[in-house]
Amino acid sequence: MSLPVTLRVLLVDDEPLARLRLRSLLEGCADPCAEVVAEAGTASQAQAWLREHGCDLVLLDVQMPGPDGLALATSLRAQGEQGRPSPALVFVTAHAEHALQAFELDATDYLTKPVRRERLQAALSRVAQRMAERAAMLASPEGQALPGEEASGVINVTDRGRLLRVPLAEVLYFKAELKYLTLRTASQSLVMDGSLSDLEPRLGERFLRVHRNALVAKSAVRELERHAPTHGGEDEAAGEGSEGAEGWAVRIAGVNEWLAVSRRQVAAVREALAAQGR
């Protein structure tokens, strides 16, 4: 699978010196290369630029005056969910505590300052790989198996240097955890690269998005219950739930595990249970 020759990059950071350092680091990157096409000092400036222009990647700080980087990422994620093209996101920040939220917003990577060129190069490679996979998916005729994926009924996972072909019929769920995905079967957990937003359209009707961080096989759905979360409500960012509020969870067949269900997906989970006569 060929990777893009040059990634078009938007730098978003309120510190001019931080943007200058990133420019310098990007100039030394190769395979793929990167070209800075614009800079912005605030999330609002970046949003305005993106309304008129396109890029492949946004290198984004978190804490900035006005709307922060997470707010911009939320806006771009919503754009992608509406079917409009949106760039990949890589956060570049001094604040490591925002990493979980960043990956829940489908960030490709999360770099902490001071950034090393080798680490930035690895992030660029991840972005280019995702772009190439997406392009292959769009170019494939409907119904044709995609490289490494599921029209053939299996998903390919690289584990400790081995290529494993896991039958989709054995997969109970995919869960996003930091920068990777966990693939769970009744007998094993495997770590794989990628994002749920890329994977979901390729899995078809057999899997259900129960939460922003989980895709569950409909056949593995066994029970839906109200659970009291240990942290704030899982939809708190969307204005749903609060500290100590009741949430929903689904029990997964074969592993005695419960996964959080967002309130907006409760009806879909109930439909999946009804279809199984449960």
Image (cartoon, rainbow, N blue to C red):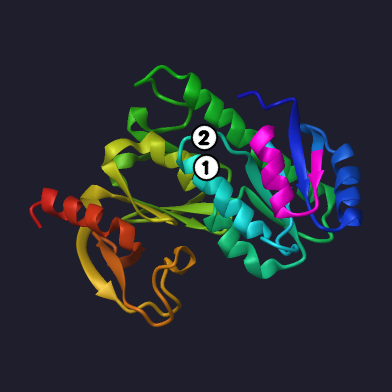
Residue 69 located left or right of residue 10 = left
Residue to which mark 2 is pinned: 84
Residue 14 located left or right of residue 257 = right
Q: Nearer the viewer, residue 61 or 7?
A: 61
Q: Nearer the viewer, residue 43 or 186?
A: 43
Vertical comparison of 137 with 214: above or below: above
Residue that appears at 64% across and 66% down? 98
Any part of residue 28 in sight: no
Label 2 residue SS: loop
Kindly identify which numbered label has been placed on residue 79: 1
Is 39 inside the magenta-drawn segment? yes
Q: For the residues labelled 2 and 1, say whether their Cβ atoms are less than 8 Å apart.
A: yes
Q: Quadrant of the N terminus?
A: top right
Residue 12 located left or right of residue 276 = right
Q: Residue furthest top?
A: 141
Q: Dot 1, how many residues are within 10 Å of its Cα: few (below 14), some (14-19), or many (20+)?
A: some
Q: Position of residue 42 (x, y in %)?
A: 75, 54
Q: What residue type is disc 1 on?
A: Gln
Q: Quadrant of the C terminus?
A: bottom left
Q: Position of residue 222 (x, y in %)?
A: 19, 60
Vertical comparison of 9 with 104: above or below: above
Any part of residue 232 in sight: yes
Residue that appears at 55% across and 25% down? 135
Residue that appears at 65% across and 70% down? 97
Range of the magenta residues?
38-55
Q: Position of residue 48 (x, y in %)?
A: 69, 43
Q: Quadrant of residue 24?
A: top right
Q: Nearer the viewer, residue 193 or 49?
A: 49
Q: What residue type is disc 2 on?
A: Arg
Q: Position of residue 164 (x, y in %)?
A: 45, 40
